[in-house]
Image (cartoon, rainbow, N blue to C red):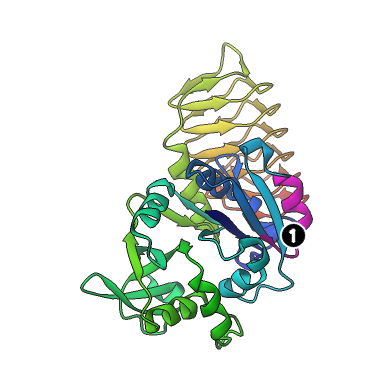
Amino acid sequence: MKGLILSGGRGTRLRPLTYTQAKQLVPVANKPVLFYGIEALCEAGIKDIGIIVGDTRDEIRKAVGDGSRWGVMVTYIEQDAPLGLAHAVKVAADFLQREPFVMYLGDNILKSGITSLVGEFQRKKPNALILLTEVPNPEIFGVAELKEGRVIRLVEKPKNPRSNLALVGVYMFDEHIFEAVDAIKPSWRNELEITDAIQYLIDSGKNVIPHMVTGWWKDTGKLEDILEANNLILSGIRRDIRGRIDGATKITGEVILEKGVEVTGGIIRGPVIIGENTQIVDSYIGPFTSIQKNCRIVKTEIENSIVLEGSDIQDVGGRIDESLIGREVKIRRGPANPLVYRFMVGDKSEIGLK
């Protein structure tokens, strides 16, 4: 079985951050979202993985390489424009060679992984297996309608959803999907929708089975989803102190300090992860915060946030909360003293607070 990871999207909902960075490389608990998908496929025994790339192809290639760090082989597949998930299957046809495969959206994280799902697909041998979960806002997802446990209808982003069952961004197909993607027409969005291709399989009498997701799943396409995924991953970490702390520093809860971290006069309340060679001086780092490598945090309070590598935050005064701060950002405090700041800041920005 092969794997196909989709990483060609532009990430418009995360701008300005994604003007300079692929959305699939935004870190959750200091690991790019894309890496969680690669690891899920690897753990399921899938070693031959194709990655669909678009405008951010160079950055994806640099981050992932040839896949050897995971013990997998990675093939990069060019998609000229994001013309739909079914279009991605079409452009990957030469790589897939009509073999059964898992399609995994590169900005998704599935806590339970996919090992058991791959096993179910291999045992039952359906033509397609789709993952579903109940959501409060089905109109922004592909939605499935079931009857007596069978999938009877799929609609992409319906105005009037007939169920609250959203398609999770993981699909499994046999060779019949290639006939389906060749048969469908572009939707009103001018995209070849995977929901239309799966509906073609259903209408053609093929066996499409649903699987309800247990545990959590996150599509990290928006700021609030990235922060929630960060919280969920950090909730499972265990203390690992490899950095240096002075006698005035207080650490409580589950905290990871990677090598080269220096904390002076700080208060760190986990769960928190702080990347290599970061300096924390006279600061409070609160729960559910991820700080990447080579950052400097001085006289600042921050919690429930993500700070990307190389950023320098000093003398903020009030607390930074629910924020995503890009690479090499500089934030300084002026004379004013507001209580809370919320940021979504792109790479290499500089902010002066007054």
Vertical side of 103 occupied by 73: above or below: above
Q: Which SS class for mark 1? A: loop
Residue 322 picture location, percent across and down = 52, 50
Question: Is residue 64 shown in magenta?
Answer: yes
Where does the image place residue 258, in percent across and percent down from the top left?
62, 25
Span colored in magenta: 52-65
Residue at position x 54%, y 47% in the image? 46
Residue 147: x percent and y percent? 24, 76
Residue 331 is a magenta residue: no
- Asked whether the viewer can see residue 114, the reply is yes
- Residue 299, compared with residue 323, is above or below; it is above
Three-letter residue code for mark 1? Thr
Residue 31 locus on image (x, y percent): 60, 41
Q: Residues within 10 Å of mark 1 (few under 14, many from 20)?
A: many
Q: Is residue 54 left or right of residue 249?
A: right
| 247 relative to 347, above or below | above
